[in-house]
Image (cartoon, helix red, strand yellow):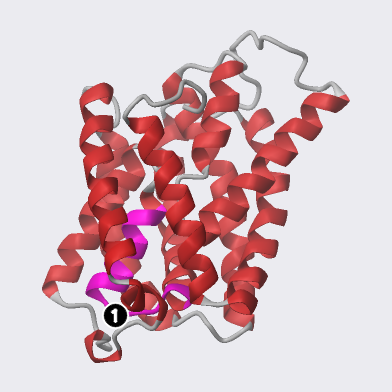
């Protein structure tokens, strides 16, 4: 829908609201490029403006689209993005994302969040326990073509991304670092490109279902575009060690929210 049928709780065309939406998109672009789960910010803002959960879930993907486009372009220009491997891993992810988007309304959200919380705790354990795997990577694990296990892993990650998207970047990083052997900088480059690949397909499902507000999404996407450029430049310049600490911080806050330790956020 071009104009949402939702009665907004505030005037979204006021200057302060436009700035807030752009700033929210900018933060999303930064966090999503370095780690993941940044889309929880726009999800929160949209819900506060009166959007139903499914409409918010569909709308936030516009910001993700421009953020990943900007970041992928930067990583490619700086010769960090392994494009061929990203394309091969992106195919099962795309297929999974369409399946996930189709079943998005058929699962209990509270139970799903608890399961997700435990998965994130396990991931935080590995990030803290084996820092070298995230910083240096494991070159012997890197293969020119995806293994059968990787096809299954990225298909399942794609299903999750199509279903919710929030936190999908963290799962992609885990698959790329712990299974595929990439360091965190190269993994981030491949991650954002994979999201760029699958997001239009998942977005199309939400558009066809009338679950996208193009007005809110387009305003927020301006900030996402800027955030993607800034974060991708920082990731290359600062290196994998810096990106790892950003990932740890995001994981801690995301896990706390999933287990109800604080009430703000999605």
Q: Position of residue 75 (x, y in %)?
A: 58, 76
Q: Is residue 43 visible?
A: yes
Residue drawn at (49%, 36%) of the image: 40
Secondary structure at numbered mark 1: loop
Residue 6: % across, % down: 59, 12
In the picture of the structure, the residue carrying the numbered disc 1 is 181
Look at the image and say whether residue 124 sits in the magenta stretch: no
Residue drawn where x is 45% and y is 80% of the image: 83
Q: Is residue 128 above or below residue 58?
A: below
Decide which of 230, 149 is in the foreground and name it: 230
As for residue 182 lying within the magenta part, the answer is yes
User: Magenta stretch?
Assistant: 169-185
Q: Position of residue 141 (x, y in %)?
A: 23, 85
Q: Quarter-wise, where is residue 183 in the image?
A: bottom left
Can the viewer see residue 95 in this picture? no
In this rendering, would 257 be left or right of 22? Answer: left
């Amino acid at each position: 829908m071009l104009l949402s049928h939702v009665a907004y709780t505030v005037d979204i065309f006021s200057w302060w609201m436009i700035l807030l939406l752009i700033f929210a998109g900018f933060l999303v672009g930064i966090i999503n490029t370095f780690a993941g789960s940044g889309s929880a910010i726009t999800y929160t803002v949209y819900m506060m403006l009166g959007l139903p959960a499914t409409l918010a879930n569909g709308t936030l993907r516009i910001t993700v689209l421009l953020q990943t486009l900007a970041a992928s372009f930067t990583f490619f220009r700086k010769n960090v993005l392994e494009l061929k491997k990203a394309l091969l891993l992106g195919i099962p992810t795309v297929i999974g994302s369409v399946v996930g988007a189709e079943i998005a309304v058929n699962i209990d959200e509270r139970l799903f969040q608890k399961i997700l919380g435990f998965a994130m705790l396990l991931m935080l354990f590995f990030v803290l326990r084996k820092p070298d795997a995230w910083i240096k990577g494991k070159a012997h694990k890197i293969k020119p073509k995806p293994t059968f296990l990787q096809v299954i892993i990225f298909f399942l990650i794609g299903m999750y991304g199509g279903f919710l998207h929030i936190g999908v970047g963290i799962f992609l990083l885990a698959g790329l670092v712990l299974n595929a052997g990439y360091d965190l900088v190269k993994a981030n480059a491949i991650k954002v490109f994979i999201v760029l690949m699958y997001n239009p397909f998942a977005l199309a499902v939400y558009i066809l279902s009338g679950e996208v507000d193009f007005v809110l999404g387009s305003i927020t996407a301006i900030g996402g575009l800027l955030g993607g450029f800034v974060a991708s430049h920082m990731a290359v310049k600062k290196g994998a060690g810096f990106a790892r600490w950003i990932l740890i911080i995001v994981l801690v806050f995301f896990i706390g929210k999933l287990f109800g330790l604080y009430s703000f956020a999605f």
